[in-house]
Image (cartoon, rainbow, N blue to C red):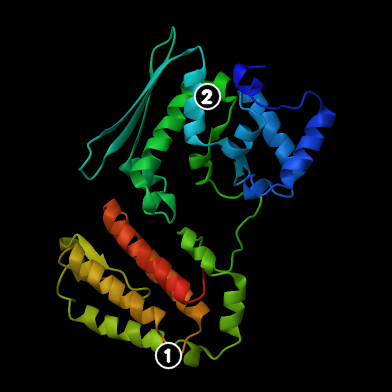
Amino acid sequence: MSNIVQQGFAPTNLTEAMQFSEMLSKSQMVPRQYQGKPEDVLVAMQWGREIGLAPLQALQNISVINGKPSVYGDAAMALVQASAVCEGIDETIEGEGTANPVAVCIAKRRGRSPVVAKFSVEDAKRAGLWGKAGPWQAYPKRMLQMRARGFALRDAFPDVLKGLITAEEAQDFPDEARPAKDITPAKPRNPLDAIAMSEIAQDVEQNDPQQEYVEVEQVNQQLQEEAASHTEVEVKEYAWALGVPGKPDIPCEDYATWAGRYEELADKVAKAGNATPETRLKKLVELRNANQVMFGRLQPEQSLVHTKALVKRRTELGAE
């Protein structure tokens, strides 16, 4: 057993491990995902033992996310740096301040050539991650760093990590244990589509569509009329265009114009009085999806502004 595992109390046989797991599962000081689940606690402690983490360290740093066991990026770094085969880890960001910064991680293993892993904004866009709700919007630079780190550490030190991926990467995998309900012919393009659950569809079916969507459709009609005034302008000449579900895109001169129109429309949709909150939430999702290309061009601080506004609207509509 490694020195890390020998620190503090650790079970010495299966009976002790099971008793210890039962006790820990009843504690409020372990992560919520392990509370009331002694079997999961036991498996996590065993994973920790194999990679060199003491029981409580394992519970804090090992997680099953979307059906995949994983270890948080900082813990993976600590395990690798504590290994005798590690000569050093270098992390940098290339092209900061540009439209395509690149996170770089160089993992140096004794006696071997360094492993270099890179992950850029363009890589994140191709993977459908850039602008994704959650950490990718709140901490995009950190998430780029974690992706490059995860690739480099797994390639250079597979024996140390025992095949575990980073939790930051596992969060972006689809949940294999709980397949999404398909209530529309099209595949969801954005995690926010999860709002449009089956009960929302049922609620819409039980109401008069003409009464239900009257104010939302009025908003769409207003924007359609505005779009008509731009029919002689080729949208391709503009870097920014407001997407309106089911309507022509509205060219915008710059980001500020697009952002102002987007937030104005989102406010109108969120406050459409004759529509139920569920319907308004669904319309907000459709509006967001119609502007995914634009969201992919946002700088982190710009993306954060729109994310905060969306969270506020969802809270007011009872989604949080």
Image location (x, y in percent) of residue 201: 58, 76
> Can residue 248 be seen by looking at this rendering?
no
- Which residue is pictured at 63% across the width and 38% down the height? 59
- Residue 214's label in the rendered image is 1
Q: Amino acid at mark 1?
A: Val
Name the one closer to the observer, 90 or 147: 90
Relative height, residue 170 to residue 229 (above, below): above
Q: Is residue 189 left or right of residue 47?
A: left
- Residue 167's label in the rendered image is none
Mark 1 packing: few (<14 Cα in 10 Å), some, or many (20+)? some
Q: Is residue 127 left or right of residue 200?
A: left
- Which residue is pictured at 73% across the width and 45% down the height? 25
> Can residue 215 be seen by looking at this rendering?
yes
Relative height, residue 115 to residue 149 (above, below): above
- Which residue is pictured at 30% across the width and 52% down the height? 300
**Cα–Cα gap, marks 2 and 1:** 58 Å
Q: In the picture, which quadrant includes the N terminus?
A: top right
Q: Residue furthest right?
A: 15
* Residue at mark 2: 79
Q: On the image, which quarter does residue 61 sit in?
A: top right
Image location (x, y in percent) of residue 85: 49, 12
Mark 1 lies on a secondary structure that is helix
Relative height, residue 271 to residue 307 (above, below): below
Mark 2 lies on a secondary structure that is helix
Image location (x, y in percent) of residue 92: 30, 30
